[in-house]
Amino acid sequence: AMSAGSLSEDGHVFMRASPVPKLKSQAMGVKRSLSPLCMLLENNLRVGGVHTYHYTILEGSVGAADGVGFVFDSRIRRTNIQRMKSVFLNKQGQACIRNLESITKLPNSLPKLAEGVVIRLTVDLDRAVASFSMHDAHGKHCGTADLSFASLYNPPVALPPTLPGAAEVDEASGFPSQPPPSGAHALPRSP
């Protein structure tokens, strides 16, 4: 965080330094300006449970790459954003799921991020759901965007088909593709 700005002693307020756009060369020598990405990460891994975060834009403008979210990983590291799995609210207020290089923009959206807005992000790691709740600078509730991130979890290992109660697993969702035979139990789906 120190190279991108300053952090208060209690670790609750981050003041971003003036971002310097980076230039990226594209085909035919054309250069494109990219907004720098700044990620603030906790120094603890969260495993299971419900976790709530509060994010407030105290002052300044919101950049093209700004947003608020939660990254899923097995360890804390700095890495290329295209190698991450996350849920986030982008600058436009749209709830998104990043699965490595793929971003899915969900239909549920909130007003654009702006100075004074407060976002409460609640992540339930046990149920694989997240909720973004937004209040404006005057404390008025602007809306809530709820989503399931079950698709980010690795699919469970299917039982071999020869065992009783085995069900084929849908690779996209990681859940049984058909109801199991009577007496067997399907994996629970997240709401």
Image (cartoon, rainbow, N blue to C red):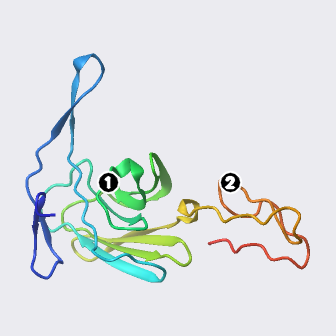
Reply above or below: 180 against 33: below
Return the mark for residue 79: 1
Return the mark for residue 138: none
Residue pictured at 26% horizontal, 71% vertical: 55
Q: Do callouts 1 and 2 mark residues in contact (Cβ within 8 Å)?
A: no
Q: Name the side, left or right, on which 179 lies relative to 120.
A: right
Corner quadrant of residue 56: bottom left
Residue, disc 2: 171
Give the residue at the far top of this rendering: 28
Quadrant housing the C terminus:
bottom right
Closest to the observer: 22 or 155?
155
Reply above or below: 25 against 17: above
Q: Position of residue 100 (x, y in %)?
A: 45, 50
Corner quadrant of residue 27: top left
Quadrant housing the N terminus:
bottom left
Other residues around mark 2 within 10 Å, as few (<14) / some (14–19) / many (≥20) = few
Of helix, strand and loop, which one carries label 1?
Answer: loop
Corner quadrant of residue 66: bottom left
